[in-house]
Image (tube, rainbow, N blue to C red):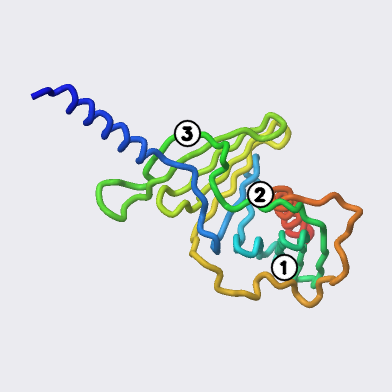
Amino acid sequence: MDVLPLLSCLCALLLASAQAQAPRHCESPPMMSGSFSVMETNGLFNSYGKISYDNFGQKARIQQAGSSNGTNFNMEVLMLFSKKVYYEINWTKFYCKKKALDVSFVPMQVPSDAKLSGQAILGSSSSWGMGVLVNTWYGSLPGNGTYSTVFTEVGCIPLTYSAYSPTTGFNTLSTFNWVIGNVDPMAYIPPFFCPQIRADETEAPSNFFQIIKDFAQNVKDEASSQ
């Protein structure tokens, strides 16, 4: 019996199995709701809130509520990519501003150019239910920046996103308590006090990440002004 062909077949099967098990770029479920926290470089300001995401309708909503010096604040950003607009909403002051939005919509996913950093188990692999298998990816950002992001192997659920740039330093976005689907269809309808006129065209259209950054700063300014 010729053993060499059998060994060759075995090696081919092992190689194919290893390739099949290698983490792959993935896309998150099309409709999700969850919570998030954002930490700035110096760690002196943390931002917490909730996020709703609708890939089908190309919509996203970010809410944030809290209190400072005994006064409550309730703010949110509603992004309607299909209409190329977004709303900055302050429920405490019943204030709303309509702005132009970048036309591009990027599904929640591992970036296509991201490289695999490694795979790990959060928790323990000693028994079922004690840990979660996750993949860490990394890539480059404009202006000599870098990023890393963590997604679960099963379900492609986003967990963390960390970005670094020489000008702003490190910023980390963490998400948790995700559920599949959106429970409130009214979540993506602007409130009655939002303007129905066209967005302010004097300002350059914003993209998703710029909106997140501006929103965090607005919340910080609102909290400090109380």
Gap between marks 1 and 2 measured at Cα: 18 Å
> Observer-nearest residue: 135 or 131?
135
Q: Count residues near mark 1 (Cα–Cα under 10 Å), then give few for <14, some for 14-19, many for 20+.
A: few
Above or below, comparing residue 123 to residue 165 in the picture: below
Identify the image quadrant of residue 67. bottom right
Identify the image quadrant of residue 140. top right
Amino acid type shown at disc 2: Phe
Residue 100 visible in the shown view: yes
Mark before the other along the chain sequence, 3 or 1: 1
Give the x, y percent position of residue 9.
23, 30
Q: Which numbered marker is on residue 71?
A: 1
Mark before the other along the chain sequence, 3 or 2: 2
Give the x, y percent position of residue 37.
59, 53
Q: Which numbered marker is on residue 198?
A: none
* SS at mark 2 in the image: loop
Residue lying at the far bottom in this picture: please name it: 192
Gap between marks 3 and 2 measured at Cα: 28 Å
- Residue drawn 86% across the image and 62% down it: 199
Q: Which residue is mark 3?
A: 117
Q: Which residue is mark 2?
A: 45
- Residue drawn 87% across the image and 65% down it: 198
Gap between marks 3 and 1 measured at Cα: 44 Å
Which of labels 3 and 1 is toward the front? 3
Q: Count residues near mark 2 (Cα–Cα under 10 Å), then give few for <14, some for 14-19, many for 20+.
A: few
Q: Is residue 56 left or right of residue 167?
A: left
Mark before the other along the chain sequence, 1 or 2: 2
Amino acid type shown at disc 3: Ser
- Residue drawn 66% across the image and 65% down it: 65
Amino acid type shown at disc 1: Thr
Q: Is residue 33 left or right of residue 206?
A: left
Identify the image quadrant of residue 120. top left
